[in-house]
Structure formats: structure tokens, C-alpha cells
Image (cartoon, rainbow, N blue to C red):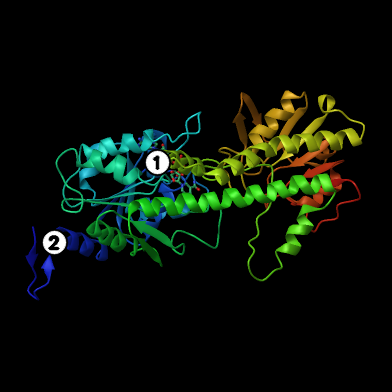
Amino acid sequence: MSSYTSTGTMVTPATELMEKFKDRTARVGVVGLGYVGLPFAVEKAKVGFRVLGFDRSQSRVDRVNAGDSYIGDVRDRELREQVQDRALLAATGDWDRLPEMDVIVICVPTPLTRNLTPDLQYIEAVSREVAGRLRPGQLISLESTTYPGTTEEVMKPMLEAGGLEEGRDFWLAFSPERVDPGNQRYTTRNTNKVVGAGHAVSREVALAFYRQTILHVVPVSSSRAAEMVKVFENTFRAVNIALVNELAMLCDRMDLDVWEILDAAGTKPFGILSFYPGPGVGGHCIPLDPHYLEWKAREFNFNTRFIALAGEINRRMPEFVLEKAMRLLSDHGLGLRSAKVLVLGVAYKKDIDDARESPAAEVLHLLAQRGATVAYHDPLIPRFREYGHDLESVPLTDGALDEADLVLILTDHSAVDYAFVARHARLVLDTRNATRGVPRGPGKVVLL
Ligand SMILES: NC(=O)c1ccc[n+]([C@@H]2O[C@H](COP(=O)([O-])OP(=O)(O)OC[C@H]3O[C@@H](n4cnc5c(N)ncnc54)[C@H](O)[C@@H]3O)[C@@H](O)[C@H]2O)c1
């Protein structure tokens, strides 16, 4: 249904919603209050939208409502300001409040099954809840990383099952989240955001929504294209990390310093991008997302060989770290079975408190399996439970360093004093070049 304003401008449900974006009267629902959803919800509240977060975890709902953040990128003070001082943000587990929302942004997990195939159970569960309560005039935007086709092939039929039609009655888009946890320079606001939708009106409405809070929005022709952009970005990282990991293993064999090679290569002013080796890849993105694309490609009788190879190389890194640790200990007349190993850093990357899919889990497991006595220190992760191990971070004292036969640096957190580590440890294997610039002592600190 459309009407006209006094100046002759046509008013449609879409233009009405877009007006509500401009004057901030649109209600914004955010489903899934995790690493992506909570910062997003806070950002939208900051610019004046009334935001309601939905999460199936009651403890997360309670903590948001108490202004108590559980996500590193959101400070308690910031959260309390939106929840308590301005009363613009709240959380709930009550799906029946979905119809109050003008926009519903979905940021739920997209893990893999044991067989490395996409596990869409969370997207499907949320789509069912939304579909059962969908009302005309709502914009639904999926932000979870997934394979090209999910929005059109999985969500759209579920949402239209009740008789409403996308493009006419409601709008549907895909806009991948690019948040880089811990990154101080690029935040939600200044990170360009891609938006795609199958229907032109859906695209227009979604663009209008995201333009309210993001400096540069990049439209693409379809939700499939937007989904492909995201999985390509993460595949690009996975492949390039695998390339430098392979180079690190080759340099080890050729007795070359891979860090020296990469630093020198990085001085080329064009045609190169710096990536660094490490003990493997972790987090919710790089180890998982390329496999979403790999799986979808099979439907088109296409083998994504770069993805398979990168996955194979990156998954092999924990074993390479173990081999190198064994070699080092053996050079010092020690066997792993009787060795005490202190691991520094279990987060999957520096300066974040996230250990999901962290290669540290596998490294710790391999060390323990071979009989080493393992302890760890991570200033951001007080407790680490993986593979049946349950460890607490030990304080980083000169005594703890000196007691260890090997100190194994797996994450290069900025809060750790590496000069202190290099001074007090007896032997260090540094898989991140965290000790760059500190006196290393001949033979005492060995790089990956
Ligand atoms: N973490 C990142 O750095 C990052 C970056 C870009 C994209 N992504 C993508 O964003 C998506 C979300 O990732 P995340 O890291 O925020 O996940 P997360 O695990 O931190 O948060 C997901 C939240 O969803 C909630 N949830 C799960 N099922 C639900 C349901 N049925 N109903 C309501 N709430 C539900 C969980 O309780 C949790 O609070 C994933 O697809 C991920 O790949 C993540």
C-alpha cells in the first residue's frame, strides 16, 4: 500500500521504515549477543536507536541488563551508559517481543559439524522463531558468516512460509560482520560494510539502515554475493597464513630465519601483503568459514583446492610446534616425557580473551599426550578447558619461568613483558616472534 505526502512524494512501507531510521524511532532487535551482536547492539544504541537484544542464554541476558559486559571489546561503562543511563539498550529471551522490532539483525554462531560441513542449526532455529512472528514492515538482516545461498535458499523460504512476501511485505538482506576483536583502529563505525539483498527494495532498506551508523557501506547485487565476499575474505587470510606457515617449515629445514625473510619481503612497496606464521589458526572464522565455501562448491561439482590445502597446512602447525619443541629439548639433553613446559598465551590471537578453536588447545594436548608436564600463563584467559584438560593460568614469575625446561610462546599478548621472559627462562620457543627487539641470548630463544 502506498500514499502520497503533501509534497507529492510517494510513501510506501519501505520509505516509512527508512524515515524511522533517520529519526531513530525504528526499534532494533539483535539476536545473538556474542562477540558480534553485543558490540553491534551497543553501537546502535549509541546513535540513539532503542535496541533490544535477544539471546537464548539467560545469564547473558541478565548480564547485559545489569550492565556487566562479558565481551572484551565492550567496556562495562559503555554498556551501563546505554542500559542504565540512557535506557536505550536491554536484553530478553522472550521471542514474543520480536514483532515490536522494525529491524531484526541476526548474529548467531555458524560452526562446522564434525565432518567439516556447515552446521546451520542456530540460523534455522532463529529463522523459525522470527518466521512464526514476522509482521509486515520488518527488515531482517543476517550477519552470521555462511556459504553463498543461505539467506535466499534457507531463510527466505522459512520466512515466506506464513504468506508474507519478501520485497513486498518484509525485507531481507545479508550483511557480513567484519569485526576484528581487539582492533583499536578499526571499529564497527569505520569498517566498511558490505550489504547485499536479492530484492532491490530489500537492498535499499538495508542500505538505509546500515548507513545510519557506518561511514562507508558497500552495496552488492545479491545476498549470495555478500555471503561470498565474507567467505572469500576469510579464505584469503587462511590461504596466505598457510603460505607463510609452509614457508616457516621450509625455512626450518633450510636453516633460514623465516621472520627475517618476511620482514625483508615486506619492504617491497607494492605487490605484497604481510602475513606471519604461527602455531596454527584459531577463532570462530579462519579455521571454519572456508569450509562453508568448500562444502557449497561441491554442489557445483567444484573442488576448492586452495581451501583444502590451506586447511591441511594450518592444521598441521601444532604438530610442527611439538616436533620443534622436542628437537630443542633434545639438543639440551632433555626428553619431552620428563620436561616441564610453560605455555605463554592460549588465546587464538594477541590481546583478546577468546580461546575458541585456538591452536594452543591442540599443542597443549600433544605435549601432555607425550608425557610433558604442562602449565600455562595467559593474562586474558584465567581458565582453559579443552580436550579434557582443565588448567588455570599460573602467575608469570621469575620462579615459574626458571622452573620450566621450555617456555613456549603461542600468543604474543602485549601485556606480557618478553624481556623479563627472555631473562628468566632457561629455553624459549617463540612461535610468534614476540621476543622481537628484546635481548635473546645466544641459543636461549629460538623462533618458529
Ligand atoms: N567473533 C568474530 O570475530 C566474528 C567476526 C566476524 C563474523 N563472525 C560471525 O558472526 C557470527 C556470530 O559469531 P560470534 O563470535 O558473535 O558468536 P558468539 O558465540 O560469541 O555469540 C553468539 C550468541 O548467540 C547466542 N545464540 C545461539 N543460538 C541462539 C538462538 N537460537 N537464539 C538466540 N541466541 C542464540 C549465543 O548464546 C551467543 O550469545 C558467526 O557466524 C561468526 O562466524 C564472528
Residue placed under numbered mark 2 in the picture = 12
The amino acid marked with disc number 2 is Thr
The amino acid marked with disc number 1 is Val
Count neighbours of disc 1 (C-alpha within 10 A) and say few if under 14, some if 14 to 19, many if 20 or more.
many
Count neighbours of disc 2 (C-alpha within 10 A) and say few if under 14, some if 14 to 19, many if 20 or more.
some
Q: Secondary structure at mark 2?
A: loop
Expressed as whole percent of the image width and height from the top left, the position of residue 424 reads 85, 44
- Position of 403 relative to 305 (above/below): above
Would residue 199 be visible to someone looking at this image? yes
Would residue 405 be visible to someone looking at this image? no
Q: Is residue 226 left or right of residue 203?
A: right
Residue placed under numbered mark 1 in the picture = 108
| Closest to the observer, 57 or 290 | 290
Q: Secondary structure at mark 1?
A: loop
* Residue at x 75% of width, y 44% of height: 249
Locate ligand 1 by image quadrant: top left
Q: Which mark is residue 426?
A: none
- Position of 114 relative to 146 (above/below): above
In whole angstroms, how far apart are the C-alphas of marks 2 and 1?
A: 31 Å
- Position of 77 relative to 375 (above/below): below
| Closest to the observer, 203 or 128 | 203
Q: Quadrant of residue 398?
A: top right
| Closest to the observer, 212 or 380 | 212
Expressed as whole percent of the image width and height from the top left, the position of residue 394 reads 71, 36
* Residue at x 61% of width, y 34% of height: 383
* Residue at x 81% of width, y 49% of height: 420
Q: Is mark 1 within 8 Å of ligand 1?
A: yes
Expressed as whole percent of the image width and height from the top left, the position of residue 410 reads 70, 43
Q: Quadrant of residue 406?
A: top right
Of pointers 2 and 1, the one earlier in the residue sequence: 2
* Residue at x 77% of width, y 23% of height: 371
Quadrant location of the N terminus in the rendered image: bottom left
